[in-house]
Amino acid sequence: MILTPASGRFLALIVLAVPLLARAQAPITHQHATIHHESVAAATGSTTNLAGVADLPLWAWLDPLAPQPGSQPGTRGGTGLAEYTSPPIDSPFAFNEALLSWNIAVPAAAGVRIDMRVAAATGEWSPWLYMGRWGDPPNPTDAADAGDRAQSFPGGKVDVDYFVSPAPARWTRLQYRLQAVRTAPGSKIGLRRVAITFSDTTATPVPQTPDGPRGKTQAAAPPKPGRLGVPFRSQKTDDDRLSGRLCSPTSLSMVLAHRGVDLPVGTVAKTAYDQDFDIYGNWPRNIQAAYALGVPGYLTRFSDWQQVERLIAAGQPIIVSVFVEKGQLRNAPYEKTSGHLIVIEGFDEHGDVLVNDPSVATAAEGQLVYRREDLTNVWLRSVEGTAYVLLPREP
């Protein structure tokens, strides 16, 4: 069995009592929408020590002041803290889950903390919920009002790395907050992208078209057969206890190499490691790790295969998260997994899916063809189509 360290979170998404055949035939009922903040238009929220904005890839800079001698780093006593709070972001539908990911340029001797909160149509806001952190110092949480790492309230919680709340879906807005500290004089913290994915996993079935639930209705051309040429990497190491935990950074390393950043799996894993939870598979942290290593990207969710086909046709591989019960994924080198990541990099002449599966030692074993209907079950249904998209490198 292949396990990712955060595998337990997927269990809440599976109704184990439902027969596999019945679930395979059930329509996909969820809907998703991803919104990107990656320009000055997003910089209309409240700020403290926001150094400037510009129409550049790094569209805003946080400039925390270095602490004065004898002061506590990250306090609100006038030193060490810069903050950006986004404007309220409206979802196109009521949601019960939300994913956040970010690309932030964090120099040495600086760190960033990321929080989020949600609001219902009645206007009530949740408390701020801790999403993660990045940089040096590793714990930029000494600021007044920012030291609490609460991840739950009566209406929902952050389950390791994404927000989830009980049905029915009732949240309609989201805000995120970035708090940066610096322990020595240095460069500013640059914002490149924050991506927000809203999900309603309780939705009734919606028509699926080549352009998504609300898109045009023209027929999609069949995908062109072939692989994109993403190099294979294995998550196997000399330490079997570690090997089963590295599918996420290993998949990341494959697409990083495809984008021209060819690094050992160990280097990518060390960068992506989440010390808060002692895991390597934290979704947004893997996105930020890729950015820190030179490749931008975002976390998202897919609703149908036409969306995937368009990306593959444009030369864009994707990393997808799967949950597999026994017998669900034919041709896989494992019977089941409570959480695993693989790379989709093409389609064959039948429309089935060409993957790089890092669970095995060699490309001959791991460059496989998975049936489209199987991946529909173990990815689009079981894990709500969650995926990493790593974009081409930027100047």
Image (cartoon, helix red, strand yellow):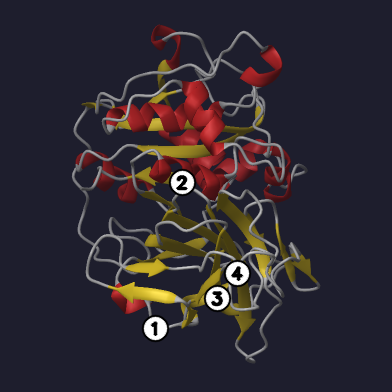
Residue where numbered disc 4 is placed: 116
Q: Of 29 and 310, which appears nearest the observer?
A: 310
Provide the secondary structure element on which disc 4 rests.
Answer: strand
Comes first in the chain, label 3 or label 2: 3
Q: Work out which quarter of the rendered image holds the N terminus and state it.
A: top right
Residue where numbered disc 2 is placed: 287
Residue where numbered disc 3 is placed: 174
The mark closer to the camera, 3 or 2, is 2
Q: CA distance from mark 3 to mark 1?
A: 15 Å
Question: Which amino acid is tagged 1?
Answer: Thr
The residue most toward the right is: 154
Residue 49 place in picture, x, y as percent: 46, 76
C-beta proximity under 8 Å, tags 2 and 4:
no
C-beta proximity under 8 Å, tags 1 and 4:
no
Q: CA distance from mark 3 to mark 4?
A: 7 Å
Is residue 335 visible to the viewer in this orientation of the structure? no
The mark closer to the camera, 3 or 1, is 1
Comes first in the chain, label 2 or label 4: 4
Q: CA distance from mark 1 to mark 2?
A: 24 Å
Residue 176 place in picture, x, y as percent: 54, 71
Q: CA distance from mark 3 to mark 2?
A: 20 Å
Question: Which amino acid is tagged 4?
Answer: Met
Q: Please tell me in which quadrant of the rendered image residue 195 appears.
A: bottom left
Residue 216 place in picture, x, y as percent: 24, 66
